[in-house]
Amino acid sequence: MINMSFRPKAFTPEWRNLLIIITLLALTGCKYPFDLETADVKPIPVIKSYICADSLVTIDIRKAVPLSQIAKADSALKGPSYTLLCNGVQVDCAQSMKGGGRMVLSAGAFRNGDKIELVFESDDMETAVAGTVIPGAFPEHELKLCRSNNADRNLKISYKDDPDTDDWYGAIVKWNGTQVQNVGLEEPQYNEVKDMHIIPPSGYDDLQIEPGAYSPIIVSFGGTYMYVWKDSDEEDNEYDLCYNYRAQWDVRIDEVKDVEIQCTLFRLSSEMYRHLFAEYDRQNNPFKDMGLSSPAFTYTNVKNGTGCLCGYSAVRSQWIEDTLFEQQ
């Protein structure tokens, strides 16, 4: 079962005490004026790519300029050149330039275990280097659908984890079915849904800063929700994914029926896990309305630049019929 004592690293007791102090200062109207020193700040490359095993590769490269120079700085890449390596061997790429000085590299698929490295150079920026290793496939596993309560479902993911390695995982669930609206209507209205994303239960993924509190890592990814964990966060090699069904936030749904789900299981590189954790931290920051943030937001694995070059592998399950409706 998942370890309910897990706390995100960004909110250990020391961090919690510091944030409480900062919050009190913010609430009491404490202000401290300062000037940003930007005279020596130079443009840096922004590299972003999620590389999936056995899929075509796209790498996005742009230029970031200091905020104080944004109105007058040239965002175009000047004399860009690059080298993409797979296991130390140079890989052929197709290069295209997009609007706003953006460069896009396209390459063929990489395999599980491949070590990827990108070296990028430009006339007005330092040489940037980023690398990752494409992880192996999600381990052997079983999926079991259980009822959490009348509205929620628990998908139990049992898998064989290697205790001698550090591993990072993720899961996405989508569903097909029928949504029914019948309250206050003379005739029920039926809406067929296909490949719809599931929704975390209300408040389930809220970031908690109390000692011993459990905050599941759930982030937006590819237009849906990804549940993310590492092997040291759970026990007995089993992860409970709690969710419910809904298609649109502004439509009342009284019932769903004829539901089937499909789960995509991910094995993540350490770089991708840290990137997604930073996104989770940013999306769920309880102090954002007061202008406060966590250093975790700034994660990058690009030397002399910013962004993230990371790898993952994915495997999809068969469609699983949700027969729990018949038992209600």
Image: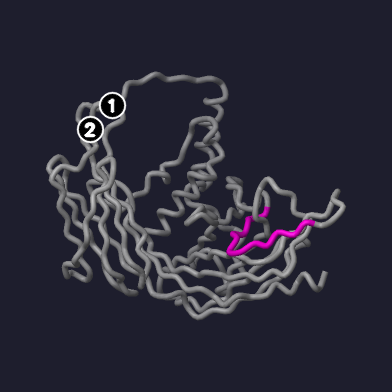
The residue range painted magenta reads 189-201
Left or right: residue 32 compared with residue 188: left
In x, y percent, where is residue 180?
Answer: 76, 59
Circle 2 or circle 1, nearest the eye = 1
In x, y percent, where is residue 269?
Answer: 38, 64
The magenta stretch spans residue 88: no
Residue indicated by mark 1: 71
In x, y percent, where is residue 139?
Answer: 47, 77
| Dominant secondary structure, magenta | strand
Point 22% across, 37% down: residue: 43
User: Dividing the image into 4 quarters, which one contains the N terminus?
Assistant: bottom right
Left or right: residue 114 compared with residue 156: left
User: Dividing the image into 4 quarters, which one contains the C terminus?
Assistant: bottom right
Q: Quadrant of residue 234?
A: bottom right
Point 75% across, 59% down: residue: 190
The magenta stretch spans residue 192: yes
Graded by Cα atoms within 10 Å as few (under 14), some (14 to 19) or many (20 or more), the crowding at tag 1 reads: few
Point 42% across, 75% down: residue: 137
Residue indicated by mark 2: 41
Residue 211 against residue 58 in the figure, above or below: above
Query: Does dot 1 land on a helix, a strand or a loop?
Result: loop
Marks 2 and 1, Cα distance to the nearest angstrom?
15 Å
